[in-house]
Image (spheres, grey):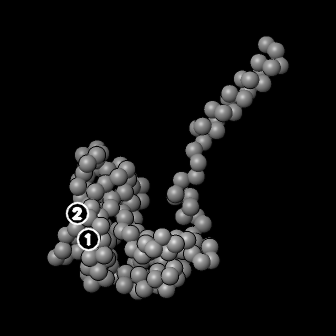
């Protein structure tokens, strides 16, 4: 085999390795976030830019059912992108792939809000209800998120809302 063929093979192998090594995922971007403050069960996070490009509040569930469901760590987020004028986008990282076309529910007693799934996240189905969910979260004690996995498990995560009001206030002060 000639030198040119060896180089060609090595180049093809290199391209294959590059193709197998995906670009950084959004989860890696979280490593560049700084914890601004913690209020109760909610943390306020912001990027290192000045002014900030992205900020969010986040919490993990206090309970999950079924407890033995195979999944990565779930989290609730309320995100803000100041440059785009987005002050409160609610999303839930479920930690598993959501069943295609699954409808879920976010419940902050007594109100319920419909969710839709995309990949491993759930979002409020009707954007006009998003701020109503945030207001219900400010006033409530707990919030339950229920949706089905692509393996057929009906999963419910329950979050404490302790500190959410203060965390949202700090989010607005920090990012806007």
- Nearer the observer: mark 2 or 1; the answer is 1
Residue 139 spot, x, y in % from top left? 27, 84
What is the secondary structure assignment of the residue under circle 2? strand
Where residue 32 sits in the image (x, y, percent)?
60, 66
Q: Which mark is residue 73?
A: none
In the image: residue 163, left or right of residue 140: right
Q: Is residue 121 left or right of residue 52?
A: left
Q: Quick one: quadrant of the N terminus?
A: top right
Find residue 56 and report its horizontal and vertical position in percent.
Answer: 46, 73
Q: Is residue 146 left or right of residue 58?
A: left
Seen from the viewer's position, the closer of residues 93 and 134 is 134
Residue 119 is left or right of residue 83, and the answer is: left
At 59% across and 48% down in the image, what residue appears?
23
Q: Is residue 158 visible?
A: no
- Residue at image position (36%, 68%) is 90
**Tag 1 residue:** 129
Instruction: Name the residue at 62% across, 73% down.
Output: 49
- Residue beneath disc 2: 114
Work out which residue is located at the far front of the displayed protein and give it: 84
Question: Which numbered disc, 2 or 1, marks the residue that appears first in the sequence?
Answer: 2
Q: Residue furthest left?
A: 110
In the rendered structure, are the residues bearing label 2 and label 1 in contact, judged by CB atoms less than 8 Å apart? yes
For residue 91, which quarter of the picture?
A: bottom left
Q: Name above or below for residue 3 compared with residue 80.
A: above
């Amino acid at each position: 085999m000639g030198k040119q063929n060896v180089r060609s093979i090595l180049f093809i192998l290199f391209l294959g390795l590059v193709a197998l090594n995906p670009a950084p995922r959004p989860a890696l971007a979280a490593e560049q976030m700084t914890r601004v403050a913690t209020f109760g069960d909610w943390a306020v996070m912001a990027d290192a830019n000045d002014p900030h490009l992205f900020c969010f509040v986040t919490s993990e569930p206090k309970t999950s059912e079924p407890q033995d469901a195979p999944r990565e760590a779930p989290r609730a987020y309320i995100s803000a992108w100041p440059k785009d004028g987005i002050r409160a986008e609610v999303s839930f990282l479920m930690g598993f792939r959501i069943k295609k076309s699954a409808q879920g529910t976010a419940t902050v007693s007594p109100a319920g809000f419909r969710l839709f799934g995309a990949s491993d996240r759930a979002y409020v189905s009707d954007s006009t209800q998003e701020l109503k969910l945030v207001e219900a979260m400010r006033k409530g004690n707990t919030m339950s998120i229920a949706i089905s996995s692509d393996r057929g498990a009906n999963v419910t995560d329950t979050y404490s809302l302790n500190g959410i009001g203060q965390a949202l206030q700090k989010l607005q002060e920090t990012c806007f």
